């Protein structure tokens, strides 16, 4: 029997970062909700406070229910992200402190331990077997990184200055399926294409200053189309037959023939020429040569469909310290590994690479920049690294290049639709 889900927040405890003049204290607690579902899982949130009394609670991250890895949100500072291990350790202790209040059996205890990053420490009274999570038939081959990507920031002072940033978050790709939205197995004419699942599993992020030359181009596909009177008549008969039956289609054909007979001699000549051209296989030349005319094509510009947007960014990464140099190298590896396809354990399948969500953020934690465009979930299609952007080969003493140029090309997975902008107040925000 599954224990009803409850929410319990641990006591507040300090997390000490650095030492001496660089020492700082962050007060946190962990808010745990569960057990959820069967097999059970637990959702854990890292909550930050301004002081030990619990002033101004702010959620700064969530722990993965299976691995305990913390995924930070935009409320987490760069120093917090770099000190993830300190917060993971403090949160594990906080989660353990509420264990007796939210677990009722060994499986739930094991699931709670997993959410605290202690998946191999299942505890129980005689039954310490946790329920295994379901495994995919296309399990990734060994060495594949499907989680545990870092949260990187460059330059390291970026979160302390008032400068807008571009936050690029890597997420696990979730196939849309036949019914759209989630991995549905049943095709639906009315639900396909309605959009992807809004639930995304974040597995890492990079924050960089907004580069120059940013733009977006929104396009739809229109093309010229023609339909002469005979084609229009045939289409009318076919549509009526499909919608109302063959008898109704035959009636429409009869009515069209009667209407044509009432028209002037030019219509009769035209029909005769078309019939003659069809019989002799000379096509429209029968009208062109015999009468010096063609059927009215009724040309019109017609909507063919939406187009997907592409975004390109170029970053010049010139580290100013050994620590920043290490961060730059990790950023390059982050994008290269994240965009690479994933081999199945059997090597029989290739799974889609991880995808990305992009956001322009205002400096000093002022939220999303609403005067630039938004993005839908994107695939990283190209990653180009120039190792000598200044034209000369220069390295630091440890071998890291003195400067790198990183060019990224993203392509949105789904088109932008009218309803993505909403129909509420027409406020002064760009939207998509």
Image (tube, grey):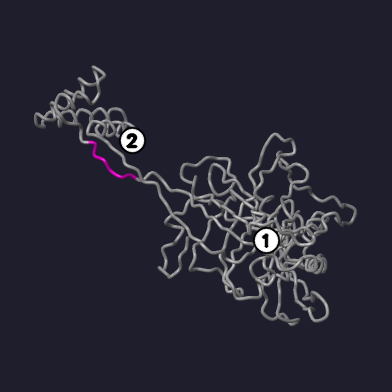
State the mark number for residue 20.
Answer: none
**Which residue is identified by label 1?**
403
Secondary structure of the residue carrying tag 1 is loop
- Residue underneath mark 2: 243
Side of 114 relative to 162 (left or right): right
The furthest residue to the front: 392
Residue 368 lies in quadrant? bottom right
**Outermost residue, right direction?**
126
Lower sequence index among marks 1 and 2: 2
Picture quarter containing residue 112? bottom right
Q: Is 100 placed above or below 14 here? A: above
Q: Position of residue 65 (x, y in %)?
A: 73, 57
Name the secondary structure under disc 2. Answer: helix
Q: Which residues are magenta?
A: 297-302
**Is 222 displayed left or right of 360 in the figure?**
left
Query: Can the viewer see residue 4?
Result: no
At horizontal 71% and vertical 42% (from top left) the residue drawn is: 136
Closest to the observer: 200 or 364?
364
Examine the structure image and report whether residue 349 is included in the region drawn in magenta. Answer: no
Q: CA distance from mark 1 to mark 2?
A: 66 Å
Q: Residues within 10 Å of mark 1 (few under 14, many from 20)?
A: many
Q: Which residue is at the front of the view, 210 or 181? A: 210
Q: Position of residue 402 (x, y in %)?
A: 70, 62
Residue 210, x across and y down, in percent: 57, 65
Position of residue 141 relative to residue 53, above or below, is above
Q: Residue at x 77, y 76 (%)?
A: 12
| Residue 307 point in image, percent of width and height | 45, 48
Asked if residue 390 lies left or right of residue 117, the reply is left
């Amino acid at each position: 029997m599954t224990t009803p889900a409850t929410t319990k927040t641990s006591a507040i405890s300090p997390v000490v970062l650095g030492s001496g003049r660089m020492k700082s204290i962050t007060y946190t607690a962990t808010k745990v909700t569960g057990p959820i579902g069967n097999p059970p899982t637990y959702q854990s949130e890292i909550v930050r406070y301004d002081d030990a009394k619990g002033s101004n609670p702010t959620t700064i991250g969530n722990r993965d229910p299976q691995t305990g890895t913390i995924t930070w949100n935009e409320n987490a500072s760069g120093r917090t992200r770099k000190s993830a291990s300190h917060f993971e350790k403090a949160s594990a202790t906080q989660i353990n402190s509420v264990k007796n209040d939210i677990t009722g059996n060994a499986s739930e205890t094991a699931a709670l331990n997993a959410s605290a990053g202690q998946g191999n420490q299942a505890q129980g009274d005689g039954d310490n077997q946790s329920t295994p999570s379901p495994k995919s038939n296309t399990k990734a081959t060994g060495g594949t990184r499907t989680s545990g990507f870092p949260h990187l920031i460059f330059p390291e002072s970026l979160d302390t200055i008032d400068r807008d940033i571009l936050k690029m978050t890597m997420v696990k790709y979730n196939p849309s399926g036949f019914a759209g939205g989630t991995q549905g197995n049943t095709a639906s004419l009315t639900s396909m294409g309605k959009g992807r699942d809004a639930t995304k599993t974040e597995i890492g992020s990079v924050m960089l200053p907004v580069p120059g030359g940013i733009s977006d181009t929104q396009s739809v596909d229109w093309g010229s189309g023609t339909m002469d009177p005979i084609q229009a008549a045939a289409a009318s008969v076919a549509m009526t037959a499909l919608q109302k039956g063959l008898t109704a289609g035959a009636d429409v054909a009869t009515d069209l023939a009667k209407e044509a007979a009432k028209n002037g001699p030019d219509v009769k000549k035209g029909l005769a020429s078309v019939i003659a051209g069809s019989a002799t296989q000379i096509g429209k030349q029968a009208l062109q040569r015999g009468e010096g005319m063609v059927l009215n094509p009724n040309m019109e510009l017609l909507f063919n469909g939406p187009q997907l947007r592409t975004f390109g960014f170029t970053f010049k990464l010139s580290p100013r310290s050994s620590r920043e140099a290490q961060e730059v190298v990790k950023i390059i590896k982050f994008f290269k590994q994240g965009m690479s396809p994933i081999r199945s354990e059997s090597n029989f399948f290739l799974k889609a690479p991880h995808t990305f969500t992009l956001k322009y953020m205002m400096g000093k934690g002022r939220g999303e920049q609403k005067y630039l465009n938004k993005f839908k979930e994107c695939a990283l299609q190209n990653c180009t690294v120039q190792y000598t952007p200044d034209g000369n080969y220069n390295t630091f003493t440890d071998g890291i290049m003195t400067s790198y140029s990183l060019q990224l090309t993203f392509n949105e997975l789904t088109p932008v639709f009218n309803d993505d902008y909403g129909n509420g107040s027409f406020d002064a925000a760009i939207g998509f």
